[in-house]
Amino acid sequence: MLYRGRAGEYALCCVYHPATHITEPCFHLWGRNSTLTLMQLFKSWRPEEISLQQVMSHIASAKKDMIILEKSEFSALRTENEKLKSELEQLKKQLTDEITKARANNKLDFNLEKSRVKEMYTDNERKLLELRTEIVEMHSQQDRAQTQTKRKIDTEVAGLKTMLESHKLDSIKYLAGSVFTCLTIALGFYRLWM
């Protein structure tokens, strides 16, 4: 166990034997030569104090290493997080830009299609109106042609009737003339024989 002494130094309250177990791995870590030089420097110290100082220096260096490692890992994670955030923001921006472009394109296509359909509708209406006027004109032409043919037929029928009447009258005249001629010839033969 560790306790703080009067002069502010740490002391190890345990027997020498556990302290050697603590310092042996340190010897292996530092190497044999450096350990021997350190041991020669601190010959005046008691072995517990030397091992305590070594353990405390190892703890301090391990603590520093952990703090540095934590800071570097934390800063690396922070930079990675910031990088990911910026990439995510860029992707969001690109996605919203693509969505707005797609919406604009769809709206434009829809409006173009709508105007094309309206134009087709007006063209069809105009063509239908033209066809109606053509049909009405054709009907009026047919009616005029029918009335003209009726008039022609009526005039020709009337002409034929008048010609027929005149031929009838001529035929009746010729018949009457023939009958009178035959009668005169018959009366002339009757007189000659009688």
Image: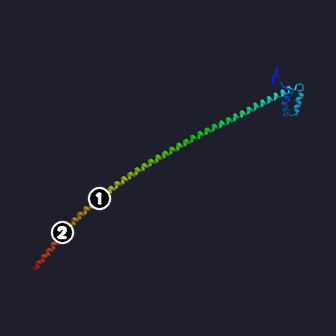
21 or 47, nearer to the observer: 21
Q: Quadrant of residue 14?
A: top right
Q: Is residue 22 above or below residue 156?
A: above
Residue occupying image coordinates x 44% and y 49%: 124
Residue at the spot x=16%, y=74% of the render? 182
Distance in Å between CA atoms under marks 1 and 2: 33 Å
- Rendered-image quadrant of the C terminus: bottom left
**For the N terminus, which image quadrant?**
top right
How many numbered marks, from 0 up?
2
Nearest-to-viewer mark from 1 and 2: 1
Residue topped by disc 2 = 173
**Picture layout, residue 60 above or below residue 149:** above
- Quadrant in the picture for residue 9: top right
Name the spot of residue 72 as percent of width and height, x first.
74, 33
Q: Secondary structure at mark 1?
A: helix
- Residue depicted at 57% across the width and 40% down the height: 99
* Quarter location, residue 154: bottom left
Q: Which residue is mark 1?
A: 150
Q: Position of residue 170 (x, y in %)?
A: 20, 68
Left-right relation of 128 to 61: left
